[in-house]
Protein backbone atom coordinates (compact mmCIF):
# COMPACT_ATOMS: atom_id res chain seq x y z
CA UNK A 1 0.00 0.00 0.00
CA UNK A 2 1.49 3.36 -0.95
CA UNK A 3 1.25 6.39 1.37
CA UNK A 4 2.33 9.99 1.07
CA UNK A 5 3.91 11.06 4.35
CA UNK A 6 6.92 12.77 2.81
CA UNK A 7 7.94 13.45 -0.79
CA UNK A 8 10.56 10.68 -0.35
CA UNK A 9 7.64 8.22 -0.50
CA UNK A 10 7.61 8.94 -4.23
CA UNK A 11 10.38 7.77 -6.53
CA UNK A 12 11.79 10.25 -9.02
CA UNK A 13 9.87 8.47 -11.76
CA UNK A 14 6.62 8.87 -9.81
CA UNK A 15 7.34 12.57 -9.26
CA UNK A 16 7.96 13.01 -13.00
CA UNK A 17 4.63 11.28 -13.72
CA UNK A 18 2.79 13.43 -11.19
CA UNK A 19 4.18 16.61 -12.78
CA UNK A 20 3.24 15.31 -16.22
CA UNK A 21 -0.31 14.40 -15.13
CA UNK A 22 -0.76 17.75 -13.37
CA UNK A 23 0.28 19.52 -16.57
CA UNK A 24 -2.19 17.47 -18.58
CA UNK A 25 -5.00 18.06 -16.06
CA UNK A 26 -4.32 21.79 -16.22
CA UNK A 27 -4.73 21.70 -20.00
CA UNK A 28 -7.82 19.58 -19.95
CA UNK A 29 -9.92 18.37 -17.04
CA UNK A 30 -9.94 14.58 -17.10
CA UNK A 31 -13.01 12.41 -16.84
CA UNK A 32 -14.06 10.75 -13.60
CA UNK A 33 -10.90 8.70 -13.05
CA UNK A 34 -11.61 8.08 -9.34
CA UNK A 35 -15.37 7.59 -9.74
CA UNK A 36 -15.61 4.65 -7.31
CA UNK A 37 -13.18 5.99 -4.67
CA UNK A 38 -13.93 7.38 -1.22
CA UNK A 39 -11.64 9.70 0.74
CA UNK A 40 -11.96 10.92 4.31
CA UNK A 41 -10.39 14.21 5.40
CA UNK A 42 -9.35 14.56 9.03
CA UNK A 43 -7.88 17.97 9.89
CA UNK A 44 -6.73 18.53 13.47
CA UNK A 45 -5.36 21.98 12.55
CA UNK A 46 -6.93 24.86 10.65
CA UNK A 47 -6.75 24.89 6.91
CA UNK A 48 -8.17 27.03 4.14
CA UNK A 49 -6.30 26.07 0.99
CA UNK A 50 -5.10 22.53 1.59
CA UNK A 51 -8.39 21.02 2.73
CA UNK A 52 -10.51 22.66 0.04
CA UNK A 53 -7.87 21.94 -2.59
CA UNK A 54 -7.89 18.21 -1.74
CA UNK A 55 -11.70 18.18 -1.79
CA UNK A 56 -11.88 19.99 -5.11
CA UNK A 57 -9.19 17.72 -6.58
CA UNK A 58 -10.96 14.56 -5.39
CA UNK A 59 -14.35 15.75 -6.66
CA UNK A 60 -12.93 16.84 -10.02
CA UNK A 61 -11.84 13.21 -10.41
CA UNK A 62 -15.24 11.91 -9.38
CA UNK A 63 -14.27 10.63 -5.91
CA UNK A 64 -16.55 11.02 -2.92
CA UNK A 65 -15.18 12.96 0.07
CA UNK A 66 -16.33 12.79 3.68
CA UNK A 67 -15.00 15.32 6.17
CA UNK A 68 -14.69 14.53 9.85
CA UNK A 69 -14.41 17.58 12.07
CA UNK A 70 -12.17 16.51 15.00
CA UNK A 71 -13.60 19.29 17.18
CA UNK A 72 -16.97 17.53 16.94
CA UNK A 73 -15.68 13.95 16.92
CA UNK A 74 -15.14 11.41 19.69
CA UNK A 75 -11.47 12.40 20.06
CA UNK A 76 -13.22 15.12 22.06
CA UNK A 77 -14.75 12.48 24.29
CA UNK A 78 -11.41 10.85 25.03
CA UNK A 79 -11.12 8.42 22.12
CA UNK A 80 -7.49 8.01 21.02
CA UNK A 81 -6.43 9.17 17.59
CA UNK A 82 -5.51 5.57 16.72
CA UNK A 83 -8.99 4.34 17.64
CA UNK A 84 -10.68 7.16 15.71
CA UNK A 85 -8.52 6.29 12.71
CA UNK A 86 -9.22 2.52 13.01
CA UNK A 87 -12.97 3.24 13.16
CA UNK A 88 -12.80 5.39 10.05
CA UNK A 89 -10.80 2.68 8.29
CA UNK A 90 -13.50 0.13 9.18
CA UNK A 91 -15.72 2.06 6.77
CA UNK A 92 -13.27 1.10 4.04
CA UNK A 93 -12.24 4.42 2.55
CA UNK A 94 -9.60 4.39 -0.18
CA UNK A 95 -7.56 6.97 1.70
CA UNK A 96 -7.46 9.26 4.72
CA UNK A 97 -6.07 12.78 4.27
CA UNK A 98 -4.76 13.98 7.60
CA UNK A 99 -3.34 17.17 9.09
CA UNK A 100 -1.96 17.06 12.62
CA UNK A 101 0.18 19.16 14.94
CA UNK A 102 2.62 16.27 15.61
CA UNK A 103 5.40 15.52 13.16
CA UNK A 104 5.07 11.74 13.37
CA UNK A 105 1.27 11.27 13.33
CA UNK A 106 0.84 10.53 9.60
CA UNK A 107 3.72 8.00 9.63
CA UNK A 108 2.35 6.30 12.75
CA UNK A 109 -1.07 5.88 11.13
CA UNK A 110 0.41 4.87 7.76
CA UNK A 111 2.41 2.10 9.45
CA UNK A 112 -0.86 0.45 10.48
CA UNK A 113 -1.42 -0.31 6.78
CA UNK A 114 -5.21 0.09 7.13
CA UNK A 115 -5.69 2.57 4.32
CA UNK A 116 -3.65 4.96 2.18
CA UNK A 117 -2.55 7.85 4.40
CA UNK A 118 -1.97 11.23 2.79
CA UNK A 119 -0.17 13.86 4.84
CA UNK A 120 -1.81 17.27 4.51
CA UNK A 121 0.64 18.90 6.93
CA UNK A 122 2.32 17.52 10.05
CA UNK A 123 3.93 19.72 12.72
CA UNK A 124 6.94 21.51 11.31
CA UNK A 125 8.14 18.36 9.55
CA UNK A 126 6.32 17.83 6.29
CA UNK A 127 3.74 19.18 3.89
CA UNK A 128 4.55 17.07 0.83
CA UNK A 129 1.70 18.18 -1.45
CA UNK A 130 2.66 21.83 -0.91
CA UNK A 131 6.29 21.04 -1.82
CA UNK A 132 5.15 19.33 -5.02
CA UNK A 133 2.81 22.14 -6.03
CA UNK A 134 5.54 24.71 -5.34
CA UNK A 135 7.96 22.69 -7.45
CA UNK A 136 5.35 22.45 -10.23
CA UNK A 137 4.75 26.22 -10.15
CA UNK A 138 8.48 26.98 -10.41
CA UNK A 139 8.96 24.40 -13.15
CA UNK A 140 6.08 25.83 -15.15
CA UNK A 141 7.81 29.21 -15.08
CA UNK A 142 11.44 28.21 -15.65
CA UNK A 143 11.15 24.96 -17.67
CA UNK A 144 14.23 23.57 -15.92
CA UNK A 145 15.10 24.06 -12.27
CA UNK A 146 18.51 22.37 -12.03
CA UNK A 147 20.97 24.87 -10.59
CA UNK A 148 18.28 27.49 -9.83
CA UNK A 149 18.49 29.12 -6.42
CA UNK A 150 15.54 29.58 -4.09
CA UNK A 151 15.74 31.76 -0.98
CA UNK A 152 13.33 30.71 1.76
CA UNK A 153 12.55 33.79 3.83
CA UNK A 154 10.85 34.09 7.22
CA UNK A 155 9.81 31.72 9.99
CA UNK A 156 11.65 28.71 8.57
CA UNK A 157 12.01 26.84 11.86
CA UNK A 158 8.22 26.53 12.26
CA UNK A 159 7.50 25.72 8.66
CA UNK A 160 6.63 22.27 7.37
CA UNK A 161 6.37 23.90 3.95
CA UNK A 162 10.05 24.85 4.25
CA UNK A 163 11.16 21.43 5.55
CA UNK A 164 9.35 19.53 2.82
CA UNK A 165 10.47 22.05 0.21
CA UNK A 166 14.12 21.84 1.27
CA UNK A 167 14.09 18.03 0.96
CA UNK A 168 12.37 18.05 -2.44
CA UNK A 169 14.16 21.02 -4.03
CA UNK A 170 17.67 19.86 -3.09
CA UNK A 171 16.84 16.33 -4.27
CA UNK A 172 15.81 17.81 -7.64
CA UNK A 173 19.12 19.68 -8.01
CA UNK A 174 18.13 23.16 -6.84
CA UNK A 175 20.17 25.36 -4.49
CA UNK A 176 18.39 26.45 -1.33
CA UNK A 177 19.48 29.38 0.84
CA UNK A 178 17.80 30.48 4.05
CA UNK A 179 17.08 34.05 5.11
CA UNK A 180 15.72 34.69 8.59
CA UNK A 181 16.36 36.37 11.90
CA UNK A 182 18.15 34.04 14.30
CA UNK A 183 15.03 32.83 16.24
CA UNK A 184 13.39 31.75 12.97
CA UNK A 185 16.45 29.94 11.61
CA UNK A 186 16.59 26.11 11.75
CA UNK A 187 19.75 24.16 12.48
CA UNK A 188 21.01 22.58 9.26
CA UNK A 189 23.94 22.99 6.90
CA UNK A 190 22.30 25.14 4.20
CA UNK A 191 23.73 28.63 3.50
CA UNK A 192 22.19 31.13 5.91
CA UNK A 193 21.74 34.91 5.75
CA UNK A 194 20.23 37.35 8.16
CA UNK A 195 19.53 39.93 5.45
CA UNK A 196 17.80 39.31 2.14
CA UNK A 197 19.85 42.09 0.54
CA UNK A 198 23.03 40.01 1.06
CA UNK A 199 21.83 37.30 -1.32
CA UNK A 200 19.06 38.81 -3.43
CA UNK A 201 21.26 39.28 -6.51
CA UNK A 202 21.93 35.53 -6.63
CA UNK A 203 18.41 34.15 -6.31
CA UNK A 204 15.87 33.10 -8.93
CA UNK A 205 12.97 32.45 -6.57
CA UNK A 206 11.93 33.79 -3.18
CA UNK A 207 9.61 31.76 -1.00
CA UNK A 208 8.21 34.01 1.70
CA UNK A 209 6.77 32.36 4.83
CA UNK A 210 4.36 33.49 7.50
CA UNK A 211 5.60 34.15 11.02
CA UNK A 212 3.74 31.29 12.73
CA UNK A 213 3.13 33.01 16.03
CA UNK A 214 0.84 30.21 17.21
CA UNK A 215 3.81 27.78 17.21
CA UNK A 216 6.18 29.93 19.28
CA UNK A 217 5.77 29.60 23.02
CA UNK A 218 7.08 33.07 23.83
CA UNK A 219 6.63 36.16 21.64
CA UNK A 220 9.71 36.51 19.42
CA UNK A 221 9.19 40.07 18.27
CA UNK A 222 7.59 42.83 20.20
CA UNK A 223 6.77 44.67 17.08
CA UNK A 224 6.13 43.05 13.73
CA UNK A 225 6.75 46.33 11.95
CA UNK A 226 10.40 45.90 12.88
CA UNK A 227 10.34 42.37 11.41
CA UNK A 228 8.55 43.60 8.28
CA UNK A 229 11.17 46.31 7.74
CA UNK A 230 13.78 43.61 7.22
CA UNK A 231 11.84 40.70 5.76
CA UNK A 232 8.66 41.96 4.03
CA UNK A 233 8.97 41.43 0.28
CA UNK A 234 8.29 44.83 -1.24
CA UNK A 235 8.63 46.27 -4.75
CA UNK A 236 11.54 48.42 -3.51
CA UNK A 237 13.38 45.37 -2.20
CA UNK A 238 12.87 43.35 -5.41
CA UNK A 239 13.49 46.24 -7.81
CA UNK A 240 13.49 45.17 -11.46
CA UNK A 241 14.95 41.75 -10.68
CA UNK A 242 13.38 38.84 -12.47
CA UNK A 243 12.58 36.86 -9.32
CA UNK A 244 9.59 34.57 -8.91
CA UNK A 245 7.77 35.10 -5.62
CA UNK A 246 6.00 32.26 -3.82
CA UNK A 247 4.14 31.99 -0.51
CA UNK A 248 2.14 29.00 0.75
CA UNK A 249 -0.52 31.19 2.41
CA UNK A 250 -1.98 32.54 4.53
CA UNK A 251 -0.14 35.75 3.62
CA UNK A 252 0.16 38.37 6.34
CA UNK A 253 -0.18 41.45 4.17
CA UNK A 254 2.58 44.02 4.59
CA UNK A 255 4.43 41.74 7.02
CA UNK A 256 5.32 38.87 4.66
CA UNK A 257 4.57 40.54 1.30
CA UNK A 258 3.47 44.10 0.55
CA UNK A 259 0.06 44.86 -1.00
CA UNK A 260 1.81 46.15 -4.06
CA UNK A 261 3.96 43.02 -4.54
CA UNK A 262 0.90 40.80 -4.17
CA UNK A 263 -0.43 42.47 -7.35
CA UNK A 264 2.90 42.14 -9.19
CA UNK A 265 3.06 39.61 -12.05
CA UNK A 266 6.16 38.03 -10.45
CA UNK A 267 4.04 37.02 -7.47
CA UNK A 268 2.58 33.52 -8.02
CA UNK A 269 0.58 33.08 -4.82
CA UNK A 270 -2.77 32.50 -6.52
CA UNK A 271 -1.14 30.48 -9.29
CA UNK A 272 0.20 28.17 -6.54
CA UNK A 273 -3.36 27.73 -5.26
CA UNK A 274 -4.65 27.03 -8.78
CA UNK A 275 -1.83 24.55 -9.46
CA UNK A 276 -2.43 22.91 -6.08
CA UNK A 277 -5.67 21.38 -7.37
CA UNK A 278 -4.02 19.89 -10.48
CA UNK A 279 -1.03 18.60 -8.52
CA UNK A 280 -3.27 17.04 -5.86
CA UNK A 281 -5.41 15.45 -8.60
CA UNK A 282 -2.22 13.92 -10.00
CA UNK A 283 -1.13 12.79 -6.53
CA UNK A 284 -4.50 11.15 -5.82
CA UNK A 285 -4.30 9.39 -9.19
CA UNK A 286 -0.74 8.20 -8.38
CA UNK A 287 -1.76 6.88 -4.97
CA UNK A 288 -5.19 5.43 -5.65
CA UNK A 289 -4.96 4.31 -9.25
CA UNK A 290 -1.39 3.90 -10.42
CA UNK A 291 0.30 2.20 -7.46
N1 LIG B 1 -0.57 26.86 5.22
C1 LIG B 1 0.76 26.45 5.55
C2 LIG B 1 0.77 25.28 6.50
O1 LIG B 1 -0.25 24.72 6.81
C3 LIG B 1 1.62 27.58 6.01
C4 LIG B 1 1.15 28.40 7.19
O2 LIG B 1 0.24 28.00 7.92
O3 LIG B 1 1.72 29.48 7.37
O4 LIG B 1 1.84 24.86 6.92
Image (spheres, grey):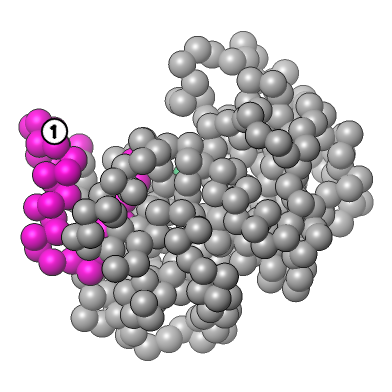
The quadrant of the image that shows the C terminus is bottom left
SS of the residue at dot 1? helix
Looking at the image, residue 72 sits to the left or right of residue 144; the answer is: left
- Residue 148 screen position, x and y as percent: 80, 58
Answer whether residue 174 is visible to the viewer in this image. Answer: yes
Residue at left 46%, top 26%? 215
Residue at left 76%, top 52%? 175
Range drawn in magenta:
71-100
Looking at the image, residue 200 sits to the left or right of residue 177; the answer is: right
Looking at the image, residue 229 sits to the left or right of residue 239; the answer is: left
- Residue 153 screen position, x and y as percent: 70, 37
From the viewer's side, name the closer residue of 49 and 109: 109
Which quarter of the figure has residue 233? Answer: top right
- Residue 99 screen position, x and y as percent: 34, 46
Disc 1 designates what residue? 76
Q: Is residue 219 above or below residue 106?
A: above
From the viewer's side, name the closer residue of 210 and 261: 210
Residue at left 63%, top 29%? 187
- Residue 191 screen position, x and y as percent: 78, 37
Count the labels in the image: 1
Which quarter of the figure has residue 254? Answer: top right
Looking at the image, residue 29 sits to the left or right of residue 133; the answer is: left
Q: Is residue 48 above or below residue 275?
A: above
Please check the rendered image and state whether residue 20 is part of the magenta-colored stretch, yes or no.
no
The quadrant of the image that shows the N terminus is bottom left
Q: Is residue 87 above or below residue 58?
A: above
Please check the rendered image and state whether residue 85 is part of the magenta-colored stretch, yes or no.
yes
Q: Disc 1 beta carbon < 8 A from ligand 1?
A: no
Amino acid sequence: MQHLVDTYDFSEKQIANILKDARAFKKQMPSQLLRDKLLITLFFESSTRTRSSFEVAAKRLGAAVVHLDPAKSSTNKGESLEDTFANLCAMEPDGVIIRHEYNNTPRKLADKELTCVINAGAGNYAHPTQALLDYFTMLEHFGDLKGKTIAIVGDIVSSRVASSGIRLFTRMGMNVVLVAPQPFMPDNDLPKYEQLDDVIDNVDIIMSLRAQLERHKAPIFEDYEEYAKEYCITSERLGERNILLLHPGPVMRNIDISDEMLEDSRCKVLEQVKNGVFVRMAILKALLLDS
